[in-house]
């Protein structure tokens, strides 16, 4: 497999003769719900600053995989390592402290709290647990970088959909992620909002930012952002590689369009 730009940067920073540990390594991850195999032996690596697209039709196991990585669900088998450290036996809150942070398909912010207060929660309860005064100051700065400076003291309930997503993203960054899991974060945006959101995600990953796993159905965003893609069908990984090559893979085409479309 070709070395990605993120892998090349990581390896250049490693001691001579050594390869830098990926920010996220998933090995043999599996989950059953009764007789249904939701995730079946999933394995992949992601390096700091790299964007990995986790793709597949509805019901293929993508969100379940994020739940297993983040600790929202216990895995039946498999391992999760963050920068070489095993986290798969840790509860969800401890994985956050280890650097695994996620967003959700439906925006989850506290509507009665201001933008600054929502972001402050991530700083107070995050990896470094800043004192309240310092957290408030940092929250306002993060809100500014997300384009929310004009709304920082407004309740989240008054914001538009795209701005609510910005709040959620700012709160996730406040947790100082080593690994950021975005579950359809770009869904539901109009074309101009989508372009803004793509630029925002790209800026976060620039310069060796967190490793990012992107579950997404918006192929424009996948092609614009992802260095590599993993495609799941019925819980199994069926393809891995560069976005255009993966999306042209016969089994991937068949999964999305059926035999006639393939």
Image: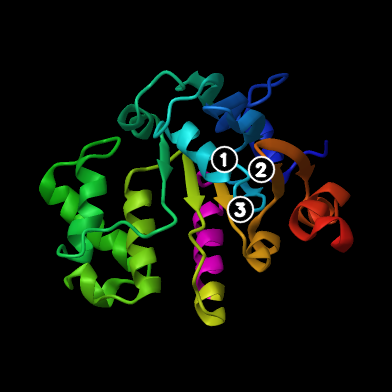
Residue 83: tell me if it is visible. Answer: no
* Residue in the image at 56% along x and 74% along y: 195
| Rendered image: mark on residue 58 | 3
Residue underneath mark 2: 6
List x then y, in percent, for residue 112: 15, 64
Image: magenta residue range: 196-211
Q: Residue at x 70, y 47 (%)?
A: 229
The single residue placed furthest to the left in the displayed view is: 133
Q: Report, in whole angstroms, how far the alpha carbon at label 2 lies from the one at label 1.
A: 6 Å
Q: Position of residue 69 (x, y in %)?
A: 49, 33
Residue 92 placement, left or right of 132: right
Q: Nearer the viewer, residue 187 or 251?
A: 251
> Magenta stretch: dominant SS?
helix
Q: Against 108, is 112 above or below? A: below
* Label 1 sits on residue: 48
- In front of the other: label 3 or label 1? 3
């Amino acid at each position: 497999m070709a070395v990605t730009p993120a892998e090349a940067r990581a390896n250049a920073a490693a001691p001579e003769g050594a390869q830098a540990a990926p920010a996220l390594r998933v090995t043999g991850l599996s989950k059953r719900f009764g007789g249904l195999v939701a995730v079946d032996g999933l394995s992949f690596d992601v390096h700091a600053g790299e964007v990995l697209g986790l793709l597949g039709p509805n019901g293929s196991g993508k969100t379940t995989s994020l739940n297993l990585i983040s600790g929202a669900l216990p895995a039946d088998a498999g391992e999760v390592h963050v920068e070489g450290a095993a986290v798969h036996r840790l509860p969800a809150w401890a994985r956050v402290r280890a650097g695994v942070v996620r967003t959700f398909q439906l925006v989850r912010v506290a509507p009665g709290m201001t933008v600054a207060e929502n972001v402050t929660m991530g700083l107070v309860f995050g990896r470094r647990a800043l004192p309240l005064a310092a957290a408030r100051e940092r929250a306002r700065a993060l809100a500014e970088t997300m384009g929310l400076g004009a709304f920082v003291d407004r309740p989240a309930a008054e914001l538009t959909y795209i701005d609510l997503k910005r709040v959620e993203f700012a709160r996730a960054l406040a947790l100082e992620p080593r690994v950021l899991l975005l579950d359809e974060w770009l869904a539901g945006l109009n074309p101009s909002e989508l372009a803004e959101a793509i630029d925002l995600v790209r800026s976060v990953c620039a310069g060796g930012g967190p490793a990012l796993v992107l579950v997404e159905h918006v192929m424009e965003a996948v092609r614009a952002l992802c260095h590599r893609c993993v495609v799941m069908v019925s819980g199994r990984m069926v393809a891995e590689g560069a976005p255009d090559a993966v999306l042209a893979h016969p089994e991937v085409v068949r999964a999305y369009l059926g035999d006639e479309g393939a």
